[in-house]
Amino acid sequence: MSLTIINKQSNKEISQRKLETYEKYMQIINWGRAYPVEFCSRFMGVELLDLQKYAIYNAWFSEFIAWLESRNAGKSTKLAIYTMLRSLLIPFHATYFLGNTGEQAKETFKKIEKLAKKEIESFAGCTDIFFNELVRNGSTSDGFVHNPASFVCQLFNGANINTLNSDVINIKGKRANLVCFDEAGWFPDELFVQAENFVNQDENFKLGGNIDIKLEPKGFPRQLMYASSASDTSSEFYKKLKLFSQQMIMGNRKYFCCNFTIDMVMSAKFNGEPYPPLISKDKVDKALSDNHDKAMRELYNKFSADSHEGQILTRRDLLTHTQNRPPLLCNDTGNRIFVFAWDSARLNDNSVIEIAEFIQDKEIGWTMNLHNVISLVDISTKKKTPKRIPEQVNDFKSLLLKYNGSEKGKLDYENIKAVICDSGAGGQMVGGVSDYLVEDWVGSDSRKHKGIIDRKHKANETAKNKYPDAVDIMKLIDPKGNRNAIFDSIEKMVKLGVVTFPAEYDGRDYLYYINDDGTEEKYDLNTEEKISLTQIELLKTEIITMCKYENTGNVTYNFPPDKRNTMHDDRVFAFGLLCYYLAQLRHGDVINKPNKPTDYKKMPSFVSNISF
């Protein structure tokens, strides 16, 4: 009896042509895994400068990577390219982007999106290989999903790229092959602890399926990548960079770090030949002249010694409460409530006015958004001393009109909750500036306006009777008697999270926004807004330099000894006046908060049945 075996063709059969196609495909993939920079150039069409090639190639085979790079070195773009390469070449590769804020991570994600769609002019030869590999859900989808919680894209090989916000509580329990920390120099330590756990699982661990683990190919190493410009010496990024460099020098291939300063960027080469720089020498010189310490940190990667004994706030504390918004130069709606703080001076110090919006939230009480910092300096003087007192008063009155919303038909000081002033003798506020403000005055709108006064201050004992129409919104604060309380309120209010700052200013002429739906906005800054943001950066420097010293029960606030003769504290003191007033408002909310009557009907039965 003979048997006839029939092999019926099925849909799962692979033709010889397909086998040859798959073989070529795998050869290309394996070649790309060995030569990622060449794959980037040949298949993605993305050409890189020599220093960028160096960073990507050496990071490819490492597990712990730190990129210390100056501004304009292209950190975010390199992160995007690196992530695209890993996702194309490694199946089921999961990537998570983290930034100081959710918007920072989304900005890097948008770089991937623009590269995939060939929307970046500087990458003229970019191909659509990545775009064609994206999984699209629906006919209208392009593969990039913009959820408010996380931007996501997924490839046909199972790889995916995700963004996460910087909320420590909401990022637990993830598993990743690559975690990218963008601007890692300003991350809180807790965020590193949570996110680094994403890659704890061994890439070679396999179980079940009757496999011999010894015969299985080695998995691709899971990676932690930290990219940032320099921060301060107390940051976790600084500690990691120090550790990684030591391990790298000792020959440990698991670690790689690089340090690209602005000089390297300006002298960058392409295939060994000089290439036009990404930034001009004039802009570097201007940054050094405007704010030398900041330029050395952001352009020359010099970690600043911002950590001092007794430091009340760090730069990371301020960045945590920084919003990507422009400064507000007027009462744009006519309904906002503002508080002014004025630390006046004539010769020896800076005369500074700071303006913040106060908002009363039903849940958390009073909060404060800082909007403007104005230095009343006479630029025509050799030493840039403050203006004459009458000129300062005129500038102050103009600001009152702008922030009150007078052009919107508002009554005098209807939207000005308070004007907090330093009453110290050096500032000439009492017996000088305040005397100019108590009288009625005619503004630039050609209308007559009432004066302002602090009726409780002893200096106005007779003036309060002579000027009965003056509005009692001025608060004259004794700087000596309240100095500790003023600086203590800065630390408490900022750490409590009820104070916010405008956007970080890096010298650009615009601010860049990414909305929750993925759309982008560009806000062009005018000259006055740039000046305001520059002044706020100077304020932040004063805040992080202020220290608290305790000696045998006595508390004093001052700059470190090496800074006392080179820095002024006028901006931070004016900011302290705002925080001091905010703290009093919040304290009043707590004191005056009505107690809710006990509803015994809602008590448990064993309690409500008790007779009293």
Image (tube, rainbow, N blue to C red):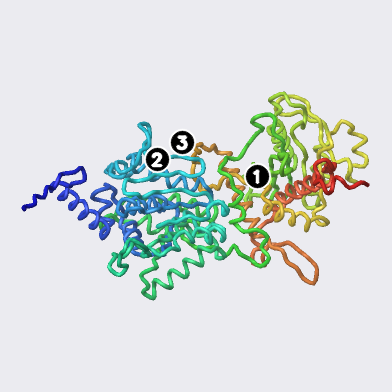
Task: Say what amino acid the circle numbered 1 marks.
Answer: Val
Task: Say what amino acid the circle numbered 2 marks.
Answer: Phe
- Upstream in sequence: badge 2 or badge 1: 2
- Are the residues at dot 3 and dot 2 in contact (C-beta closer than 8 Å)? no
Residue that numbered label 2 is attached to = 144
Q: CA distance from mark 3 to mark 2?
A: 12 Å
The foreground one among 338 and 144 is 144
Query: Within 10 angstroms of label 3, few (less than 14), some, or many (20 or more) residues?
Result: few
Task: Say what amino acid the circle numbered 3 marks.
Answer: Thr
Residue 323 coordinates in the image, percent (x, y): 58, 45
In the rendered view, tell whether residue 151 sits above or below residue 85: above
- Residue furthest toward the front? 1
**Quarter where residue 480 is shown:** bottom right
Residue that numbered label 3 is attached to = 519
**Quarter where residue 348 is shown:** bottom right
Q: Nearer the viewer, mark 2 or mark 1?
A: 2
Whether residue 269 can be seen here: yes
Residue 482 coordinates in the image, percent (x, y): 81, 55
Whether residue 429 can be seen here: no
Residue 219 coordinates in the image, percent (x, y): 33, 63
Residue 406 coordinates in the image, percent (x, y): 71, 27
Residue that numbered label 1 is attached to = 373
